[in-house]
Image (spheres, coloured by chain):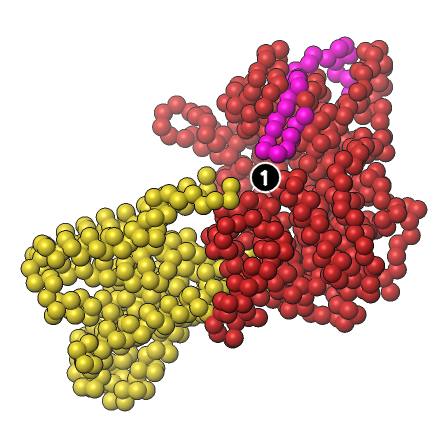
Amino acid sequence: MEQTKKTWIDYYKKFGIYIFLAAVFIFFAAAAPNFLSYKNIINILRQVSMFGIVVTGVSAVMIGGGMDLSVGGQMAVVGMILGYFMVNMNMGIVPAIVIGIFIGCLFGSLNGLVAVKLHVAPIIVTLSMMLVLQGVAYLITGGYPITGMPEAFTMIGQGYIGVIPVPVIIFVIFIIFGWIVMNKTYLGRHIYALGGNKEAARLAGINVDRLTVFIYAFTGFAASIAAIIMVGRTNASQPGAGSSYPFDCMTAACLGGISISGGEGKISGVVVGVIILGILDNGLVLMGVNSNFQSVVKGLILLAAVAIDCYQVKTKKS
Amino acid sequence: MHKPDSAVFKRKVWAASGSGMRGNMANTILSVREIVKDYPGVRAIDHLSFDVEEGEIHALIGENGAGKSTLIKTLSGAITPTSGTIIVNGREFSKMDPILAKEQGIGVIYQEFTLVPGISAAENVFLGEKTSAGIFVDIKDRERRAKELFDQMHVEIDVSKPVRDLSPACQQIVEIAKAVSKDVKILIMDEPTAPLTVSEVETLFQIVRNLKKRGVTIIYISHRLEELFELADRVTVMRDGAYVGTEKIQDIDRQKLIAMMAGRELKETFPSRNTDLGEEVLRVEHLYGNGDKDISFTLHKGEILGFAGLVGAGRTELMRVIYGADPMESGKIFLHGQEVQIHSCNDAIASGIGYIPEDRKAQGVFLPMSIKWNTIINNLKAFSNGIFVDEKKENETAADYQKKFGIKTPSLDQRVRNLSGGNQQKVVIAKTLAANSEIIIFDEPTRGIDVGAKQEIYKLMNELVEGGKSIIMVSSDMPELMGMSDRIVVIYEGVKTGEVAKEEFNQNYILDLASGGNENGTDEKNMD
């Protein structure tokens, strides 16, 4: 059998996500008031930008065969540290940002190191890290938010370049960066190799341990960038920030075609997944649907996405 | 075909050996008649017939791939034979299924344990059985009954301990107890001593003999010939899926058994090649690690060096150490006379060593990825400017190998998953060569691929050595090994038992070495 058998699943894998995006878009364009307004579209993009950056990081981990539930906790802690340095210690914006990013990468590396050295499953490592960091975020100020960031810093979250919000620009730069890394560099290929077949990757001469640590560090990097935008946008460091991120990120990644078992998925798909979730959030609010029902919709969508992923894996075997 | 000996003689021998519980003609408990099992492109069992008598220990032997495992699976109902009948206790069946086999009292102990590691020995013995009324499990009752079973076997095992904390021997015994608890009449044991130490083997033998005393019939499969002389009453030899003969153990010796196992003609032809052996490219000295002990050998430019041995002898383990996939405990590796340190696969690749693993799908290829993606993955740095992958070079290289190896595909973007086994193997070879390997280790290069593709792989190997590369070939297919190699190193249980030059190739001799025989007559080449 040399020919590829094209099943509807293959077509779904290729186009389904775009059809889904179009359907959601058309639905809300018709059903939700003001959905199509210029202001709302920009609003959606701004809403998804911070989230999308984290999802890009989480997707890299998932393509590499791992998982990261600690991104929300990382964002909260990095956010608190930024606030603490800039407001309580009057540190300059640039050093504060550099330290924040450094700490994000450090948390990520820690996840990777524990997973590699202690052979603990990624879900346990990052779940533990999530709990630890959520606690640490509250411990920094005893639970109080930090407000009053330097004005220049809030520009990162609230400002515009031309008509486009700064977060959106950062998001676009980030996904282009992510896309190039995953598709064009040998590093990206190594990540796909690692997630696709770890033993074959090792035999192909790839230092799988070092690569694993690197991918988690990259996710930490993404989380810290998102934390910077978040603090800038709300002009506050909130210890409870990001708590819904771990699962929202997986929802978007799976929706975008990232395989739970690793090695498959595209950054372009992930972007679409992120935008679909953004449109859902925005459109349902515009329609006045209550937030509990929004959660029901998200849950069903994740289930559908993963079920299709599993179905595909099953047919693969036979 | 060997005719059964006369009953008179049988009686005499049994009386003499002191093991004759039943003086007279034993009943045939299990017969296999004209069993055939076909897989696509290969006949695993070929019109096999043999009889097992009630209460005997019947050994079943044959080379790797002789069809023993397939036969066991046929008897246990794991697979359905293409044709033929199985007669158990006088009842005829065209096939078995697991439930039917159980009803007929057939139990199998596979090479891989089927125990649940986290639960106790007692729980494992009665796994899946309802041993007490109601919905609650009476654990004390189970433990008591498991203990009874172990007492009958005269072994001491803590029945409340999780089996993962037991030694391999004890786990093996739990497996046996599990089978025996189901009132098994015919117990099939597939290589039961493979994971055991010498003293544990003795314990196992004692248990097997006890089972026999209780009237259980045992079909015993082993690679270790000496075990058969200690344990078995009769032995049946299989070769290439067919029946060779059945002998009483007293009537046969090791040499005869080996002759029966090996006595096959070389049916396949192997393409010839013109190479002159060049200088030494690889020398391994006193290598220890991964279960292998004190292994030394050399490889020359343009040579195909074969590695013979039984499955599990430690050949793959050795290759993985040389390739840096598993750590070396001690020893030295020299490339072109220079000692090299290989600590990772990357070191090996950088030194020009390539490895084509035995399990193609699990270790060789990335199934969801394209042919071209796979082709360059072993040496990505050479196909990139430090950061970005050179896609033009990728396409050219992949197209090059596709043409050279005749990889049948509509496109280089085709996922490797969609290729046939032979073509997948070619992709693995391409991927190894694209990493500029000078020394290529082929581990079971033709396993699971059809005859035509095999010939292509052989030709390709010849072209490689003619082009100045050197090959190490691990194969369990004796004709293939003898047909392709310039020299053969034989490994038995992690130790090198011999090295045979092409002029001395002889199946019986190699098989003898592979079964732990001594190298007498040939002098060991001095590695200094």
The chain that hosts pointer 1 is: B
Please, is residue B227 above or below residue B461 in the view?
A: above
Q: Tell which of A98 and B394 is nearer to you.
A: B394
Count of numbered marks: 1
Q: Is residue B66 left or right of residue A109?
A: right
User: Where is residue B243 shown, x and y percent of the image?
Assistant: 73, 25
The magenta segment: B18-46
Question: Toward which corner of the image does residue A281 lie, by quadrant?
Answer: bottom left
User: Which residue is tagged 1?
Assistant: B112
User: Where is residue A310 shown, x and y percent of the image?
Assistant: 37, 46
Please, is residue B211 above or below residue B169 in the view?
A: above
Chain letter, colour red in render:
B
- Res. A36 in view: yes
Task: Please give the name of the residue rendered at 69% of the width and 44% of the height, measured from the top-left corner.
Answer: B455
User: Where is residue A237 shown, x and y percent of the image?
Assistant: 21, 76
Callout 1: few (<14), some (14-19), or many (20+) C-alpha neighbours within 10 Å? few
Which amino acid does the dot numbered 1 rest on? Glu
Please, is residue A186 above or below residue A318 in the view?
A: below
Q: Is residue B480 left or right of residue A16?
A: right
Q: Tell which of B117 and A313 is nearer to you.
A: A313
Is residue B33 magenta-colored? yes
Q: Tell which of B36 and B152 is nearer to you.
A: B36
User: Where is residue A24 shown, x and y percent of the image?
Assistant: 19, 54
Q: Is residue B441 left or right of residue A92?
A: right
Task: Please give the name of the residue rendered at 52% of the width and 25% of the height, measured from the top-left corner.
Answer: B98
Task: Please give the name of the residue rendered at 23% of the width and 75% of the height, measured from the top-left corner.
Answer: A167
Chain letter, colour yellow in render:
A
Q: Residue furthest right?
A: B521
